[in-house]
Image: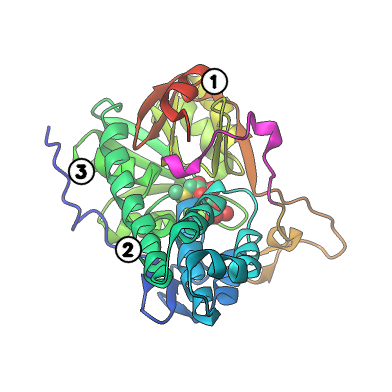
Amino acid sequence: MSTAIDYARYDRVRPIRWAGDALELLDQRKLPFAVEYVRCADSAAVAEAIANLTVRGAPAIGIAAGWGTVLAARDVQATDGAAALEQLQPALQALNASRPTAVNLAWALARMRKVLTTAGADWRESLLCEAQVIADEDLAANRRMGELGAALIEPGSGVLTHCNTGSLATAGFGTALGVIRAGVAQGRIGRVFAGETRPWLQGARLTVWELQQDGIDATLIADSAAAHLMKTGAVQWVIVGADRICANGDSANKIGTYSLAIAARHHGVKVMVVAPSSTVDMQTTSGEAIEIEQRDPGELFGIGGVRTVAEGIHAWNPVFDVTPGELIDAIVSERGVIERPDRAAMQTMFAGH
Ligand code: MRU
């Protein structure tokens, strides 16, 4: 079995481009039928793009927020980083408030803040450099996680993924989708299934399109077909990403992940959560403390702009849920693999994080 991964072949999409004077974001609201970049010339535009899902996925919104900070700095006159930080506070707060659940957003902004606290007159260059390092580290982490996660998969396995955790959601290669890319490249994964991911359809609109760009065949299923699929024996692993992993291993991810984990345990299918250490939040002790984003109930009232629900109906639209650590078989980060995560194992791997 070959273990080398041809990244030029298995990683063709880039959602975030720094243009020197603006941030260009691949508009994920329009995929798969239009491949268009939105130009954000200031930090308010970046915050808006995060809130309206032009850019989405936990690592990607952290990276975008880093570049948003660089854009905000263009309006600041200061002689050192500490003075700049004071002036940047409103922009940093607006970026931080753009989405609540993924901790990568606050994590990236904390890194940008930290750089400023020690920077001198060259604080602008330091900010620029940090934004680029955040992106570069994410790509490197994804490639490492791809290798670590794929090594857990028996040759010939079928896998099911949820939402979009690929290049589109990161600096490149992806988290859970990176493991799937690596597993396919190494001949370990025989079949890939992707859930539609109602209501925003990240699986149907983004994941299967992204895999198609790499020539990876994926089979789309309705979210509600997942338990039935598991019962057929066609999948051995559910492989998903995360928006926040707590100190006890509880993991927030796209709504529907928790149902998948329950169904997986019932059918003897294993669950792998793949996320960089930037998604780990050791300050949040358990999943109950995670803020779950509620989005416009209107997302449930139609598809592609066509209303499918009678007028006057109420809807509830939480877009994340929390999978308890005890339903997770492996958490894969760039630091290593935690099998059957619990507080002690998390503390050992992420002490001081
Ligand atoms: O609402 P989204 O599309 O931003 O939700 C994304 C997810 O839930 C992903 O699984 C998670 O952010 C990990 S992306 C590598």
Please provide the residue range marked out in magenta: 277-293
Image coords of residue 144 (percent x, y) = 27, 40
Q: Residue at x 52, y 58 (%)?
A: 113
Percent position (x, y) of residue 159? 38, 35
Is the CB of mark 3 within 8 Å of ligand 1? no
**Amino acid under label 1?**
Arg
- Give the percent coordinates (x, y) of residue 263: 56, 27
Identify the residue under disc 1.
Answer: 343
- Answer whether labels 1 and 3 touch (C-beta < 8 Å): no
The answer to whether any part of residue 283 appears in the image is: yes
**Residue nearer the viewer, 263 or 39:** 39
Count residues near mark 1 (Cα–Cα under 10 Å), then give few for <14, some for 14-19, many for 20+: some
Q: Which residue is mark 3?
A: 185
Image quarter hosting the N terminus: top left
**Left or right: 172 in relation to 245:** left
First in sequence: mark 1 or mark 3? Answer: 3
Residue at figure coordinates x 31%, y 56% from the top left:
136
Under tag 1, what secondary structure? helix
- How far is disc 2 from disc 1 in space, using C-alphas? 36 Å
**Type of the residue with mark 3:** Ala
Name the element at disc 2: loop
For marks 3 and 2 on the same chain, the one whose residue lies earlier in the sequence: 2
Q: Which residue is mark 2?
A: 13
Label 2 or label 1, whichever comes before in sequence order:
2
Instruction: Reply above or below: 333 against 69.
Output: above
Does the Cβ of the disc 1 residue fall within 8 Å of ligand 1?
Answer: no
> Disc 2 residue type?
Val
Q: Which one is nearer the viewer's eye here, 153 or 331?
A: 331
CB atoms at circles 2 and 1 under 8 Å apart? Answer: no
- Foreground mark, 3 or 2, reads 2
319 vs 84: above or below: above
